[in-house]
Amino acid sequence: MRKKREAGGPEVSESERLLFGGPLRYDMGWNEHADAFLELSFRAMTVRLPGMLASSLRLARQADPRAARIVLAAEVGRGAAQAVSLLAVNSALGKLLAGPDIAQRLRAAAPALVVMAAVMLVAALLRAASTYATGRLEPKVERVATELYLERAANVELAAIEDHAFHKLLDTAQYGARSARSMISYGARVINAVISLIAAAGVLTVLHPALLPLLVTMTLPSAWGALTNARRRYESFHTWVQHARAGHLIGNLLTEPAAAPEIRVHGVGPFLLRHFRSMSETAEAEQARLSRLAARTGLIAAAWTGLATVATYATLGALLLGGAMALSVAGTAVIAIRTGSTSLDTLVLEINELHEEALFVGDLQRLYTEAAERAIPSGGLPLPEDPREIRFENVTFSYPGDAARPALDDVSLTLPLGRIIALVGENGSGKTTLVKLLAGLYTPARGRILWDGVDAASADRRLLAERVAMVAQDFKRWPFTARVNVAVGRSSAPLTEERLAASIAEAGAEEVVADLPRGLDTLLARNFSGGHELSGGQWQRLGIARAAYRRGRILIVDEPTAALDARAELEVFDKIRALAGSGQTVVLITHRLASVRHADLVHVLEHGRLVESGTPEELLARGGVYAELYALQAEQFTARVPAPKPA
Ligand SMILES: Nc1ncnc2c1ncn2[C@@H]1O[C@H](COP(=O)(O)OP(=O)(O)OP(=O)(O)O)[C@@H](O)[C@H]1O
């Protein structure tokens, strides 16, 4: 409990409450970390060390096997060089401090001194090789890890992307690739420090058995301090990652073009700035808390190290005084203790850094695993080549966290292919949800969606998506050229001018393209130099062109004319009708009931339930929900048009 409060830091700021409706801290309940990754005890870390090194090495080998081999060989070589160098020092000191004649002693020590020089040269060369190979390796490792992250994230079900817990993982795992990069150099240094430590420890044990435990005692406090701080930093990072994202969000809102007009007209700038400052101050308070604790831990560790150092050198002195150790041996011992404690200090720090980075890489690996589990399944039954109809059979679907209010409730309906089918209903009645299920973006909680006899749940999802082209209500306005904005409808197909021109004509978007300063090569992103912005209606035409470019058998258009003027609306519906005439299935969602009269079949939804189905004429004649909505809209146009005044 104490840890939880510690990481939670200051109280929830007013800004968090007002802008985001509550605290933006992830709850760091320990049960979330069943794998005990946060258990940062020295023993736990040492046990995990080989695994961490192995995972770095695996990534490195995947990214650039040659560079990985060079780094590994160079670091092992450097460690070995240090061992040889210590032995040479020992031998040189032994020769220099024993014997009568100084010239003779120097001669005797010369081979050892030559060995020391040669070893230094080799070590320098190895260091250069390692620096070069590490520098080559690091960006590649980061790229490989990032690619994996993006690939897996792009391939999960839509429901996972909308799931809060998965989003947290996406949030934290994004730092993993950078950590994977850093792990390379930390890993290399750890290997190097381990080997040189083994060398120093070996030499010390040979010199006197008491020296090794003393060396370890000297290093333990700094190990403890580094570990304690690392755990605090990691815990805090996890708790605060969402808060940090919100801070960036406010910062971006202040500069992005989409928000710029409202910021100026409504004077939102100072309001956002105030909250940016307040959120930053809350985050700074957390940083200050961490620094305060780090300083305290550092002081305690330093006091213990000081005591241990005094004890070590006092022991050495006592051994000398008592005649238990020769002066030359004591000299080597001092050097070995210094080398050893430096190596051990470095080792502890590097392991700690490695471990801290490994925690983030651990997040990344958890994301890889979870994303693989939640990936859109591959394989499955083929769909009928030319199905006659798609049937929804008692389909119920709720959005995650909203099971009490199903967005679709026991819906059974038929979508005959090759026709225009309109979905009608008031806001929130479930029309968009229905087409998302049709497109395979969600799967029903209950019931089935049958393509002739084949259940979409057991069908190959990629084949299903192949058949569908969709202009969603909030279709993506890609910040790329107009050409890409159309051709992205089927990015796997080779981009041909004929197909582009045909789709643009089908969507009636020729004028939109003709008006662009550089035609199809115009960049449709205002915030880049040379970028151009389209109006809502112009974008909508391009959206329809994109769907036409896709050439899916089933065209789903959700509010295709919402942003179009009256003339353009008529034109777009004519185009859509023409498409249906050529055998294309059109599933149309619209609130403009005048446009629905050309549909072959209309399904009316209300609160997630199907309430009426039939041709527009049948529904009008029935006098139900459709007729009521139709009458409401028609009323708006029955007012008499004023007669022109006589001249
Ligand atoms: N991604 C989502 N997560 C959670 N709830 C959602 C999501 N999308 C829609 N809903 C909810 O599901 C219900 C049906 O929404 P849907 O978008 O299907 O309605 P609609 O008929 O298309 O409405 P509109 O005419 O306004 O476009 C609504 O209550 C809505 O709040």
Image (cartoon, rainbow, N blue to C red):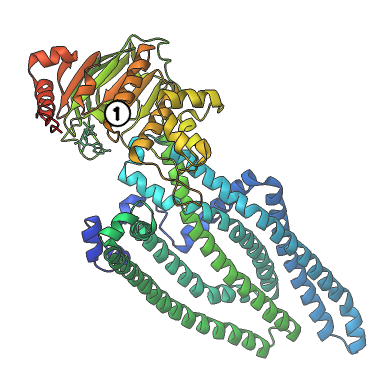
Residue 475 in sight in this render: no
x%, y% of residue 528?
Answer: 48, 51
Which is more toward the observer, 323 or 108?
108
Q: Which corner quadrant of the figure contains ligand 1?
A: top left
Seen from this angle, which residue lies furthest left?
623
Dividing the picture into quarters, in which one does residue 212 lie? bottom right
- At a point 54% along the width and 23% down the height, the residue shown is 498
Counting from the top left corner in percent of width and height, residue 319 is at: 65, 85
Q: Is residue 606 above or below residue 7?
A: above
> Looking at the image, which residue is at 52% across and 28% down?
492
- Type of amino acid at the residue the image marks with label 1: Arg
Quadrant of the frame with the C terminus: top left
585 up-or-down from 109: above or below: above
Q: Position of residue 576 (x, y in %)?
A: 34, 20
Residue 522 located left or right of residue 534: right
Decide if ligand 1 comes within 8 Å of the CB at mark 1: no
Q: Total of numbered circles in the picture? A: 1
Above or below 280: residue 450: above
Query: Residue 510 versus residue 602: which sits nearer the camera?
Result: 510
**Disc 1: which residue:** 567
Q: Nearer the viewer, residue 195 or 416?
A: 416
Instruction: Name which residue lies at 39% across and 66% down.
Output: 232
Whether residue 424 is visible to the viewer of this picture, yes or no, is yes
Badge 1: few (under 14), some or many (20 or more) residues near its Cα, within 10 Å?
few
Please give left or right for residue 482 compared with residue 434 in the image: right
Q: Secondary structure at mark 1?
A: helix
Image position, residue 148 (x, y; %): 52, 42
Question: Does residue 502 appear left or right of residue 496 in this picture?
Answer: left
> Which residue sits furthest front?
647
What is the quadrant of the N terminus in the image?
Answer: bottom left
